Amino acid sequence: MRAVDVIAKKRDGGELTAEEISFFIQGYTRDEIPDYQASAWLMAIYLRGMTDRETEHLTLAMAHSGDVLDLSDVAPLVVDKHSTGGVGDKVSLVAAPTLAALGLPVGKMSGRGLGFTGGTLDKLESIPGYRSDHTTQAFKDQLRRIGIVLTGQSADLAPADGKLYALRDVTATVPALPLIVGSVMSKKIAGGANAIVLDVKVGSGAFMKTVAEATVLAETMVRIGRSLGRRIVALLSDMNQPLGWAVGNALELREAIDTLRGGGPPDFYAHCIEVVAEMLLLVERAGDLDAARALAAQAITSGAAWEKFTALIAAQGGDVPTVEHPERLPQARLVEPLPAPADGFLQRVDAAQVGLAVMALGGGRAKKGDALDHAVGVVTHVKVGDRVSRGAPLLTLHANDAQRLAEARERLLAAHIIGPQAVDPLPLFYGRIALP
Ligand code: URA
């Protein structure tokens, strides 16, 4: 079999066989197929799509590109949550330790920033020393020892996703449904969790712009999870504005720390509670959502979630005093408000543009392997539906370069639409998908 023929078949709209897909995934994982051919293949998939059958083959081939963990010797039930990517989405940083504090072992493989979205690993790596390259053995050992792991793909675990993810990020091939399904679900399958809550984002700051598209994505992932015997549910959540206030690696980490300590933005806190509560329902630790929410809130207010978080940071080599004193996290030199240009109401936000502004400040990657500036980002002060007054700060920019700051300012101004009409606040969720 030749890679060029598999590329040509997809370019021409053909349906790839399981053998062709595994040939490509294995070849790329082992460095036998180069980046330029993989890039062409990804673009062909982006443009032509994949059938459900192809998407399932892709997911399984990616999951089996490394070890597929069986965690039954570690714990009878391991849980995991995953987001399809958003702006200001730091839910894992709060939800994972909260679940672990409730006695549910969390074994999670996260991603880095992708396109205009941020990545949990990039946020955690704002902490000096934090490591996210667990071997299979290290993953299991840590899970057994402290009941929580928050790592990335490694040479052992879903390595195909590790490589393809970085390539998609810089080849404009991220927002393709089969590639998102393959990426998310291969990590979830390889990670070995028995129960999975998917946070499927919808809106201007998500890869799926409409509820209809997000529903198809969620149903596909839930179906694959179910067919592999996992308990799985997907929430469709709003991403038409950044979640919480902060966007940017260290700024978001700081916000997650505030939330774990009982503060944080109300929308972000409510979102985290909902994700945890859905998991508690899925594993039958609560009889209904209200009881589940109360348990989740209690894990935070008691300080148990915060304790798990610091145990996680310590176990992964991170500097605990830095998270205990988050003012020691990287800080930008230039911190400037962006005043609202008019009186009125914040009617709409182009959240992808907010993510792109943070990337352009240095918070994301333009090409594979680029170093990040963890300190940069924005902190928003208003939500859609809020009244704004001319001259009052719409948001605050954190930058390390005056030229980049000026460019981000323009982009952010254009991304915030202010008008005289009042508009309703945005909902947090649009629904949930749990197939029978
Ligand atoms: N998260 C992932 O892990 N992969 C994607 O493709 C999108 C979000």
Image: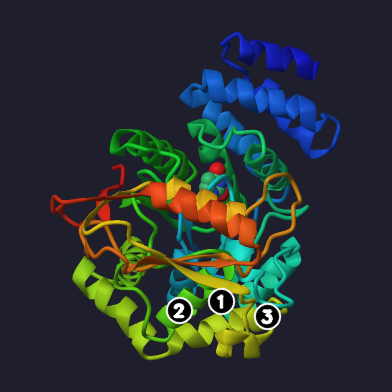
Q: Which residue is mark 2?
A: 103
Query: Residue 199, can we see it?
Result: no
Above/below status of 217 relative to 143: above
Question: Please, what is the three-letter code of the amino acid marked with disc 1?
Answer: Gly
Q: Position of residue 338 (x, y in %)?
A: 42, 64
Q: Residue at x 51, y 32 (%)?
A: 176
Of pointers 2 and 1, the one earlier in the residue sequence: 2
Check disc 2: other Cα within 10 Å, few if <14, some if 14-19, many if 20+.
few
Q: Quadrant of the N terminus?
A: top right
Tag in front: 3 or 1: 3
The Cα atoms of the two marked residues, 3 and 2, are separated by 17 Å
Q: Residue at x 51, y 39 (%)?
A: 181
Q: Where is residue 426, by image quadrant?
A: bottom left
Q: Are marks 2 and 1 in contact (CB under 8 Å)?
A: yes
Q: Is residue 101 left or right of residue 210?
A: right
Query: The residue under label 2 is which amino acid type?
Result: Gly
Label 1 secondary element: loop
Quadrant of image for the C terminus: top left
Model colouring: rainbow
Question: What residue is shown with label 3?
Answer: 315
- Which residue is identified by label 1? 147
Of the numbered discs 3 and 1, the one sitting upstream in the chain is: 1
Mark 3 close to ligand 1, CB under 8 Å: no
Mark 3 closeness class: few <14, some 14–19, many ≥20 residues within 10 Å: some
Nearer-N-terminus badge (3/2): 2
Residue 308 percent coordinates (x, y): 52, 83
Q: CA distance from mark 2 to mark 1?
A: 8 Å
Helix, strand or loop at mark 2? loop
Q: Is residue 109 visible?
A: yes
Dot 1, how many residues are within 10 Å of its Cα: few (below 14), some (14-19), or many (20+)?
many
- The picture quadrant where one finds residue 371 is bottom right
